[in-house]
Amino acid sequence: MSEYKNNYDHWENDDEDGLPKIESTDELLANLPPLPEEIVEGVVRQGHKMMISGASKSGKSFLLIELAIALAEGTKWLGFQCRKSKVMYINLEIDRNSLIHRFINIYNILGLKPINAHSVSIWNLRGASKPLDELMPELIQIAKLRDVDVIILDPIYKVMIGDENSASNTAIFTNLFDRICNETGCTFIYSHHHSKGSQGFKRSMDRASGSGVFARDADALVDMIQLNLIEVPLENEDDESSATAWRLESTLREFASFKPVNFWFEYPIHRVEETEKLDKNYVDGDPRANLLKSYKRRQTRKSRKEEFDEAFDANKKKDGTCLAFVLAEYLGIAERTVRDRVKEFSDEYVTKKGIVSRKK
């Protein structure tokens, strides 16, 4: 035992192993360290990691350019106040001249004067990108020399290492993000694409393509997803016929997840919808989208069985089942009443763990 203790003491006091030292909680409480400043208020802090996910060709780059400008000028981004910061924008996908014009157009349309445009450094690497482990030394050096606060990398798949569907490969890859943050002190923000297919049944943190390590690693995950405008809530539809509607959802480590933000993409900028116009529009694959059709139900008297059959058929998923809470909202009854109806019609329906299905 004493031999083990001596070896342990040697290991604990070894300053050459490169690892952080073990700290006592009472010492930390006596000298409480300050929290890092918020870069995007209520979303992400200085030196932390943030992932923006969305479908391919969904306008993520425009959203990131708006974020870079908001950080440089100290303005709001989708309603969130940004701290004035120096930004390095690493462009891996867009033609150099096109990117410059995007920055200029967004400044103009937002009505902002580029007072602090010098705070944004652009590194155009389209056609010259490398895997992140090879790019990282130069990236860190440039970030230090330019004294930047935030690194924005768009998109992450261009510098991927290994298979994005492999948890072990993705863990190795995301460990590089930590090294970038630790060695530069910067907030690291990057974009990633959704997996294929409908995303409405998934939680926001499960929509990104590849291993779930991506979602678990980020300190702040914000996901943008398009809404299906079954009920178009425009006062003058012709004025905004080219606009698309979106919702921003979050999974945050440092803060409570914020209330979903609805916004319009009016090329080339995004505008927050301040009213509740978009609240009852849902994404592709979300069973609640069928609730928008509920007002079309005929007002004539029907038997409870006919009404239940109609509700089930209108809301059933591809696997032939239906969520009990969806039926409840559609019928305007309590979820408990749905369970009672299933018992009443037990010769045809069955429910288990909130899922209603028809007997074969």
Image (cartoon, rainbow, N blue to C red):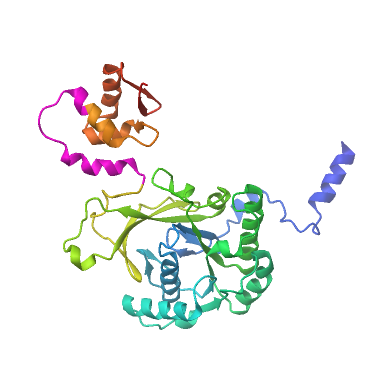
The answer to which image quadrant residue 288 occupies is top left
Q: Which one is in front, 84 or 263?
A: 263
Q: Going 82% across and 45% down the picture, which residue do you hit?
A: 8
116 above or below 33? below
The answer to which image quadrant residue 179 occupies is bottom right
320 above or below 121? above
| Residue occupying the far left of the picture | 300
Label tally = 0
Q: Which one is in front, 181 or 170?
A: 170
Q: Does the image show residue 46? A: no
Residue 350 rendering spot, x and y as whole percentages = 35, 21
Q: Is residue 288 magenta?
A: yes
> Is the C terminus in the top left, top right, bottom left or bottom right quadrant?
top left
Residue 110 rendering spot, x and y as whole percentages = 33, 75
Q: Is residue 22 magenta?
A: no
Horizontal relation, residue 176 to residue 253: left or right: right
> Is the N terminus in the top left, top right, bottom left or bottom right quadrant?
top right
Range of magenta residues = 285-307
